């Protein structure tokens, strides 16, 4: 994929199908399936929606 284009645009996948796929992945992760970053060992510190303590 280049230029920010995804499977909907390049491969003709419908937005509904892509939404369903994303929703099903969300449910699997909520049920305990590890994300790709967790499987690669980055899951503990990769996503921080807010910083604790002082930020410079």
Image (cartoon, grey):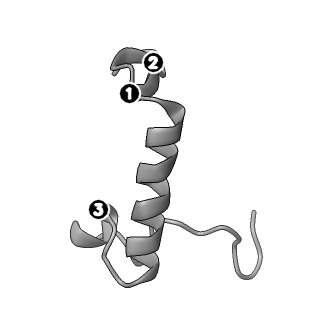
Q: Nearer the viewer, mark 2 or mark 3?
A: 2
Instruction: Say which element carries label 2.
Output: helix
| Image quadrant assignment for residue 48 | bottom right
**Lateral position of residue 26 relative to residue 12, left or right:** right
Q: Which residue is mark 3?
A: 36
Q: Which mark is residue 7?
A: 1
Q: Residue at x 69, y 73 (%)?
A: 51
Q: Residue furthest left?
A: 40
Dot 3, how many residues are within 10 Å of its Cα: few (below 14), some (14-19), or many (20+)? few
43 up-or-down from 2: above or below: below
Q: Which mark is residue 9?
A: 2
| Image quadrant assignment for residue 29 | bottom left
Q: CA distance from mark 1 to mark 2?
A: 5 Å
Front residue of 54/48: it is 48
The earlier-in-sequence mark between 2 and 3 is: 2
Instruction: Say which element carries label 3.
Output: helix
52 up-or-down from 37: above or below: below
- Which quadrant of the rendered structure holds the C terminus? bottom right
Q: CA distance from mark 1 to mark 3?
A: 19 Å
32 up-or-down from 3: above or below: below
Dot 2, how many residues are within 10 Å of its Cα: few (below 14), some (14-19), or many (20+)? few
Q: Residue at x 36, y 84 (%)?
A: 32
Dot 1, how many residues are within 10 Å of its Cα: few (below 14), some (14-19), or many (20+)? few
**Lateral position of residue 43 relative to residue 23, left or right:** left
Q: Nearer the viewer, mark 1 or mark 3?
A: 1
Front residue of 42/28: it is 28
Percent position of residue 53, x then y: 74, 82
Q: Residue at x 41, y 78 (%)?
A: 44
Discs 1, 2 touching: Cβ within 8 Å: yes
Front residue of 33/23: it is 23
Q: CA distance from mark 2 to mark 3?
A: 24 Å
């Amino acid at each position: 994929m280049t230029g920010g284009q995804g499977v909907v645009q390049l491969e003709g996948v419908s937005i509904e199908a892509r939404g369903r796929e994303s929703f099903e992945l969300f449910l699997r992760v909520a049920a305990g399936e590890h994300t790709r970053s967790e499987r690669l060992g980055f899951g503990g510190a990769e996503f921080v929606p807010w910083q604790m303590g002082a930020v410079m």
